[in-house]
Image (spheres, rainbow, N blue to C red):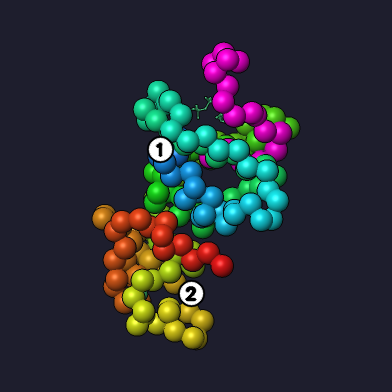
Amino acid sequence: MSEHELRVSKIRNGTVIDHVTGGQALNVLAILGIDGASGESVSIGMNVPSDRLGKKDIVKVEDRELSQSEVDVLSLIAPEATINIVRDYEVVDKLRVERPEVVTGVLSCPNRNCITQGNEPVASKFDVVADGVRCSYCGEIVREDIAAHLDVA
Ligand code: CTP
Ligand code: ZN
């Protein structure tokens, strides 16, 4: 890629989430709990051309690595995403996200009668099924807009 085409600067240290489904970058930030208030340096490209995907989003977060549960939820909204760990400007690790069997503690159940929605703290747990995620406690299925059910504090 020529320098004329570089849209978002390289980062020194942190994580580049590449090949994100076009239009999902803001949901990626929501999954990472980034709203700008805590001062992270973040660069975003939305709907940029991609050989593989046609259009993709890309999210670069400096000085931050992702937890497994964050990666698990990312895989649900961006199944083609690549996670690149950058240290001193070099990509030192590159992994594809994998669809997990279970997602614990990241999504909240939309069923108000679900035990996870009560006052007693019960961590949410969803089984990943073919057409979405299913609450392990009440069986409620979330099919569309999984990011709208993120349990962000
Ligand atoms: N990147 C970055 N800062 C760095 C190094 C890489 O922002 N210091 C970004 C690149 O711009 C690219 C992604 O991290 O979007 C992956 O980098 P690299 O593996 O070098 O690129 P490709 O080989 O094109 O990746 P892939 O094969 O996964 O498409
Ligand atoms: Zn439930």
For badge 1, the amino acid type reads Gly
Left or right of 21 in this view: 32 = right
Asked whether residue 12 is drawn in magenta, I would say yes
> Who is closer to the viewer here, 26 or 61?
26
x and y percentages locating residue 142 in the rendered image: 31, 63
Q: Relative to 117, is 150 above or below? A: above
**Residue 22: numbered disc:** 1
State the mark number for residue 123: 2
Tell me: residue 80, above or below residue 138: above
Can residue 80 be seen here? no
Please state, as top left, top right, bottom left or bottom right, where the N terminus lies in the image: top right
Element class at badge 2: loop
Indicate the quadrant containing the C terminus: top left, top right, bottom left or bottom right: bottom right
Q: Which residues are magenta?
A: 1-17
Query: Which residue is depicted at the point 48% across and 79% down?
Result: 122
Amino acid at dot 2: Ala
